[in-house]
Image (cartoon, rainbow, N blue to C red):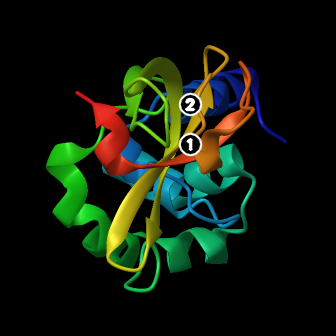
């Protein structure tokens, strides 16, 4: 049974994960990014398992070659172009589409990066309604999630 200081530590770890660097995104239900982040912060495998509600074996697998290290190698080439942290508010520029009068800029919260083939994008939560004819953004409203190309992020 966890004591009060253990539960406080677990809550702190969960809070840290909500604003961790975007390089530590969780790309699946195994929480590989969160595992890698907490491990780098010096937490034990047992503490990580408790905070992320994973089995100890799952944490160990996440820290091996097929877990977070593999994910990190795939995203490392995009590192300089990614926003800093999950939860950051960023500006995105949606390119002109059709007869529209130019690109549309809006703000969004970073949720994670996403890899597809040799490219990288971001999953964001919009902070404003978007008025654009661009197909992947059509009818997107405030608080909607959207997958955007990394090129749309304006540092």
Locate the N terminus and report the quarter of the image it occupies: top right
State whether residue 2 is above or below residue 25: above
Crowding at mark 2 (Cα within 10 Å: few <14, some 14-19, many 20+): few
Q: Mark 1 points at which residue?
A: 134
Left or right? Give the position of 126 relative to 144: left
Residue 42 visible in the picture: no
Residue 97 drawn at (x, y percent): 48, 42
Residue sitting farthest toward the top:
128
Confirm or deny contact between disc 2 and disc 1 (CB under 8 A).
no
Residue 75 visible in the picture: yes
N-term mark: 2 or 1 = 2
Crowding at mark 1 (Cα within 10 Å: few <14, some 14-19, many 20+): some
Q: Quick one: 147 or 96, which is closer to the camera?
A: 96
State whether residue 89 is above or below residue 103: above
Q: Quadrant of residue 28?
A: bottom right
Residue 78 drawn at (x, y percent): 22, 57
Residue sitting farthest toward the bottom:
66
Residue 35 drawn at (x, y percent): 50, 57
Q: Residue 18 carries which label?
A: 2
Residue sitting farthest toward the front:
99
Frontmost of labels 2 and 1 is 1
State whether residue 130 is above or below residue 114: above
Q: Quick one: 30 or 88, which is closer to the camera?
A: 88
Q: Tag 2's secondary structure?
A: helix
């Amino acid at each position: 049974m966890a004591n009060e200081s253990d539960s406080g530590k677990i809550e702190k770890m969960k809070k840290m994960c909500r604003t961790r660097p975007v390089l530590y995104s969780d790309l699946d239900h195994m929480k590989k990014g969160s595992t890698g982040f907490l491990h780098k912060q010096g937490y034990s495998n047992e503490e990580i398992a408790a905070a992320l509600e994973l089995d100890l074996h799952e944490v160990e697998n996440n820290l091996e070659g097929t877990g977070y290290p593999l994910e990190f190698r795939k995203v490392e080439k995009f590192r300089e172009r990614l926003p800093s942290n999950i939860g950051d508010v960023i500006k995105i520029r949606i390119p002109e589409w059709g007869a529209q009068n130019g690109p549309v800029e809006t703000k969004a919260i970073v949720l994670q990066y996403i890899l597809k083939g040799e490219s990288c994008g971001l999953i964001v939560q919009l902070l404003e309604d978007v008025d654009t004819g661009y197909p992947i953004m059509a009818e997107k409203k405030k608080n909607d999630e959207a997958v955007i190309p990394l090129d749309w992020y304006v540092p």
